[in-house]
Image: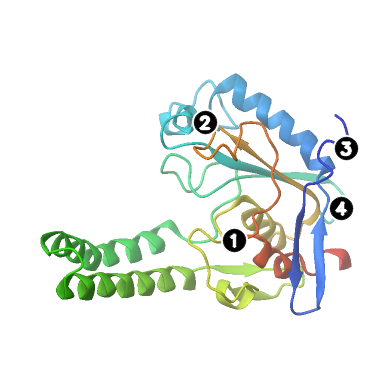
Amino acid sequence: MNKNVHQDLSYSGFCQTCNKTHSLPSEKAIAYCYDLMAQLRAHCSIALFDQKENTDLRLTTANLYSSQGGEMFGILVCEDANGNEVILRAFSSTHNGLWNIEGWVPHLVSENDFMQIVEKGNLKIHPLTNLIQTLEKNSDDWKLKVEERKSVSRKIHAELFELYEVTNFKKEKRSLADAFTNKNGIPNGTGDCCAPKLLNYAAINNLKPISIAEFYWGRTSPSGDKIEGKFYSSCTDKCQPLLGFMMCGIKDL
């Protein structure tokens, strides 16, 4: 592996608590990412255990080449209290409808709690959508109901964000709203990417992060900015505003 190929990768964030930018290198994790890519290519599945016996078709990677598109995968290399190396793996958001899969770090929130809020919200959103479709576009009533739907949607997203709690390596816990440094609003999907999942799991389980890397797998994105097997830095809109707080305390371990 050419050490200079991935030197432009950045996994970092500014911490408002200590006024420092925290970061992790990627080189060591990249080597394990290549191993994971080889496994994905060979098995066409994200099942990491009992490959031959696992019959859950939802674990296939075939969906990543459909119109649904690919997803990000990440690896965090850690050390436990005895200095043993521990490899953590994550996939972004959900895989083919699955939230938590053996061998991968869990989602930050409970699927049941999340879906309860979504289903409750749909009872309000769907009737408004149906009503809007019957109204004359850009009429006063149409505009009124469109704004009402936006208001309901914002409240639902706020409820969902309240479910998320992130932990750093000083054992401090914060909600997304308190940990997020960009005050222009929290984008949908924040907290569901690989890096927050990996770091949160490591912090809760007393593991010291050493190296992190993320790559894309599946059909090239419509815009062409995501290509299978290519590594990407942590996203600037959803992850970097969280990573400063989440990485705080690593150097003190």
What residue is disc 1 on? 238
Report, in whole angstroms, how far the alpha carbon at label 4 lies from the one at label 3. Answer: 31 Å
Q: Which residue is mark 3?
A: 4
Disc number for residue 82: 4
Q: Amino acid at mark 2?
A: Arg
**Residue at 66% over, 68% down:** 167
The colour style of the image is rainbow
Judging from the image, what secondary structure is the residue with disc 2 in?
A: loop
Q: Quadrant of residue 66?
A: top left
Residue located at (88% from left, 37% from top): 4
Comes first in the chain, label 2 or label 4: 4
Percent from the top left, x then y, of residue 101? 52, 42
Quadrant of res 192? bottom right
On the picture, is 201 further left or further right than 186?
right
| Numbered mark located on residue 142 in the image | none
Q: Give the image location of residue 211, x and y in percent.
A: 80, 49
- Mark 4 or mark 3: whose residue is earlier in sequence: 3
Tag 2 residue: 219
